[in-house]
Image (cartoon, rainbow, N blue to C red):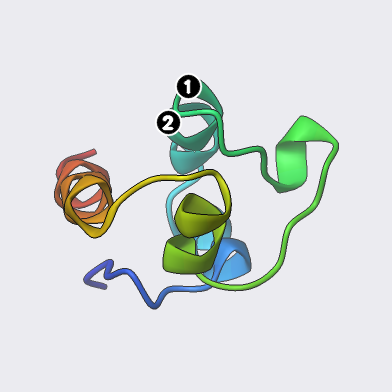
Amino acid sequence: MQIDKEISIEDLVNYKSESVRYLRDKGIKCIACGEPIWGTLEDAALDKGFSQEDIKGFVRELNEL
C-alpha cells in the first residue's frame, strides 16, 4: 500500500502502526494518543499549520518507515 496525503488517519494507523509515534513527534495527535482525529493526513497536518511542502515530506517519510 502506498501512503499519500489523502490516506485517512484511521487507515494510516491500521496500515502502519509506527505512524502513531511519527505523527505524535510532529505534533499531530492521533488515535493512540488519546485524542482521536478523523479525516486525511493532509487535513490533520493543515489543521496544525503545516504547509503542502511539509505534507509532501511527511508522505515520503511515512512511506520509508
Q: Position of residue 9 (x, y in %)?
A: 57, 62
Q: Amino acid at mark 1?
A: Asp
Q: Relative to 27, does residue 10 appear above or below in the rendering?
A: below
Question: Is 61 on the left or on the right of 47, as rendered?
Answer: left
> Dot 2 surroundings within 10 Å: few (below 14), some, or many (20 or more)?
some
SS under mark 1:
helix
Question: Is 8 on the left or on the right of 56, as rendered?
Answer: right
SS under mark 2:
helix
Q: Amino acid at mark 2?
A: Tyr
Frontmost residue, 36 versus 19: 36
Q: Residue at x 47, y 57 (%)?
A: 46
Q: Position of residue 45 (x, y in %)?
A: 46, 52
Q: Position of residue 65 (x, y in %)?
A: 24, 38
**Disc sitting over residue 22 in the figure:** 2
**Disc sitting over residue 14 in the figure:** none
Q: Farthest residue toward the right?
A: 34
Contact? badges 1 and 2 (CB < 8 Å): yes
Q: Relative to 36, does residue 39 appear above or below in the rendering?
A: below
> Dot 1 surroundings within 10 Å: few (below 14), some, or many (20 or more)?
few
Frontmost residue, 50 versus 44: 50
Q: Residue at x 55, y 37 (%)?
A: 20
**Disc sitting over residue 25 in the figure:** 1
Q: Residue at x 39, y 78 (%)?
A: 6
